[in-house]
Image: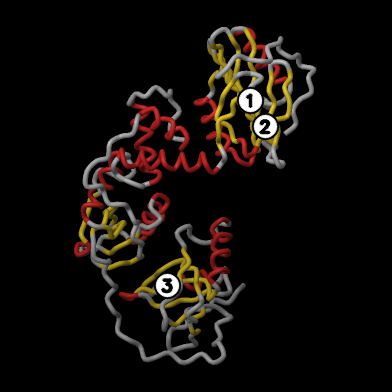
Amino acid sequence: MRRWVFLVMAAGLPMAAWAQDAVIRIESKRDAEVSEAAARWASQFDDVVTFPLPRGWTAIAIGPLSPEEAGKRIGALKEARQIPLDSFVTVPEEGVVLTPVGEAATPVAGTPQPAAPQPDLPAPGPAPGAYLRLQSVQARSEADAALAEWRRTFPEAGLAELPNGWFGVVLGPVDRATADAWLRVFKDGDVVPDDAFVSDAAELGAVIEAGKAPGFPAPPAAPAEMPPMDQVQRALRWAGVYGGEIDGKTGPRTRDAIQAEILAERLSTDPGTAMAELIARRDAWRTEVGLTTLDDPATGLSVMAPMDRLAFDRTERALSIYGPRDNSGAALILFSQPGGQQELLDLSGLVTALGWVPQPVRSIKPGHVLLEGANDAHIGRAEGWVRDGRAEGFVLIWPAADAKGQARIAAEMSDSFARKAPAANDAPAPDAESAPLRP
């Protein structure tokens, strides 16, 4: 059995805390609880240390480590559930003495002896400003658990010991108007409880776990005009928060999607401003991926397509085929022929037979067919319509590693798909013996 070695206090054998060293903070205790907790952790790890915190608290940590080592090790330890999930990496302040715990507790060569004990100093108060009070609890153990949970939503959150002896999970500082505006947004989105409120720094007491200023943008002086709703809906679909029709109407699904985007990106509390910024981000992305208008002469179809990654290959009866450019792994097939619903279904069967959409999930409605599927290599999407006596549409093949990009590009193509000229290549649909395209 391992021999229990209890905490070596400051008068014993300290370890100097080098300025560049970091530690993994795993627990904080007071008074008689320190020795027992430190010994428990020392039974599991050989490099457990303690160091003093304000107001009589003592930190129990693993270290010292380089910041890089600490970052790698904390992830592995949390994944293995060997340390609390709210453990974190910190660099002790200059002059703080790390005291080793356990059988290996020996002084480091050249370590200076600690200075005479100093009286406990009060914990610092929060930085001036306003704070969102997210939750208040009575016990410290509950407070630590609450902070860890809130940091899933707000990584910047901190913990304060309130004047009444309770503990508060807080988010700040920000100026008062900004705090009030974002609190309304978070309450409307059910991100914070109804009893959350804004508090000034002077009402919080001592800082137990420091947070960071969240950097919320201030509300605009006046609301911005909402962009055209069809553009908003397309941008929301591009962002992955809207799956409804592009009808230019402000319905419940559109309003919910606008709120979801504001909560996700936290760029503005004003819907008009937030949507204008979203549309600008979408436009920048379209340029980045090389979306340009493709007017295909064989089928007479026009569509926005990522032509930086595609190169024309050939036409086959009702098909125009664009293969990968520079081994991009992308491909596009445009199809168009005279006919109606049955011809559209026949073409969807051809798409499946040739493996362009692997193991597809089908959505079939009068005048519309959608096939989506994927394997380890690529994602396939085929969409077709019956319009003006023709069965026509597209198949997009995209690398499986870029599912998010594929979804965005497919949506852009669906929105922009149109006929620009008569088809120059009308012929019966090809049969399933045609050689499949291999992007």
For discs 3 and 1, the disc positioned in front in the rendered view: 1
Indicate the position of residue 389 as horizontal and vertical percent values.
57, 7
Q: Which residue is denoted by mark 2 in the rendering?
A: 331
Q: Quadrant of the C terminus?
A: top right
Q: Earlier in the sequence, mark 1 or mark 2?
A: 2
Which mark is drawn over residue 149? none
At horizontal 71% and vertical 42% (from top left) the residue drawn is 326
Disc 3 marks a residue whose amino acid type is Ala
Q: Quadrant of the N terminus?
A: bottom right
Give the amino acid at mark 2.
Ala
The residue to which callout 3 is attached is 59
Find the distance from the CA under tag 3 to the CA under tag 1: 59 Å
Which residue is nearer to you in this view: 326 or 203? 326
**Is disc 2 placed on a helix, strand or loop?**
strand
> Which of disc 1 and disc 3 is earlier in sequence?
3
Q: Which residue is the site of mark 1?
A: 395
At horizontal 51% and vertical 90% (from top left) the residue drawn is 111
* Position of 243 relative to 366 (above/below): below
* Other-residue count near label 2 (Cα within 10 Å), few / some / many at <14 / 14–19 / ≥20: many
Judged left or right of residue 11, residue 225 is: left
**Residue 63 vertical position relative to residue 210 in the rendered view, above or below:** below
Q: Residue shown at 57%/39% (left/top)?
A: 290
Q: Which structural element holds mark 1?
A: strand
